[in-house]
Amino acid sequence: MKTRTSLLVVLAALSLVFISCDTTTIPTQTTASTPVFSSTVQIVFTVNFNLNGGDGEAPEEQIVESGWKAEGPQNDPTRPGYVFTGWHATPEGGELFDFETTPILSNTLLYAGWTPILP
């Protein structure tokens, strides 16, 4: 019986030690040496330009974050006998791509639009 009583006293004492532990020493802020991992995934798309028969080099590929807008190329391409009409989503032309209002939501290929110069 003495052994059982002694064991209970020891367990009770250990319980008080665990209950009274000071937990304020656990670090709550990261430091420069603590790696921090983020679960945020940044989705980006490419915007490419096809001269569609024009001369020179196509504008550089743009890497655009999803939902953001691409920038219109600084220089218009040239093509002998044609006037550049803007950038389009299809090689046949159609509606102009609006760099000011159109968000990029997928990889995008834009084509130069051309109108022949009449003699």
Image (cartoon, rainbow, N blue to C red):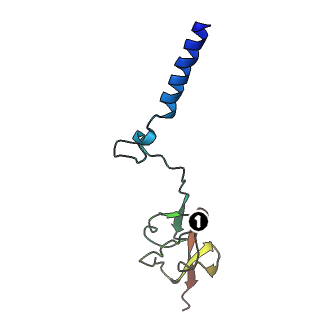
Residue 42 locus on image (x, y percent): 53, 56
Left or right, 74 with respect to 96, comes to left
The residue under the point 55% across, 23% down is 12
Q: Is residue 94 left or right of residue 41?
A: right
Viewer-side residue, 17 vs 101? 17
Q: Position of residue 96 (x, y in %)?
A: 60, 81
Q: Residue at x 48, y 28 (%)?
A: 17
Dot 1 falls on a residue whose secondary structure is strand
Give, as a three-letter code, the residue at label 1: Thr
- Vertical comparison of 91 with 25: above or below: below
Q: What residue is pinned by disc 1?
A: 108
- Quadrant containing the N terminus in the rendered view: top right
In this view, 36 is above or below 78: above
Q: Along the line of sight, which residue is nearer the eye, 34 or 94?
A: 34
| Mark 1 nearby-residue class (10 Å; few <14, some 14–19, many ≥20) | some
Residue 10: horizontal and vertical position, in percent?
A: 52, 18
Asked if residue 47 is positioned above or below residue 25 in the image, the reply reads: below
Residue sitting at x 51%, y 23%: 14
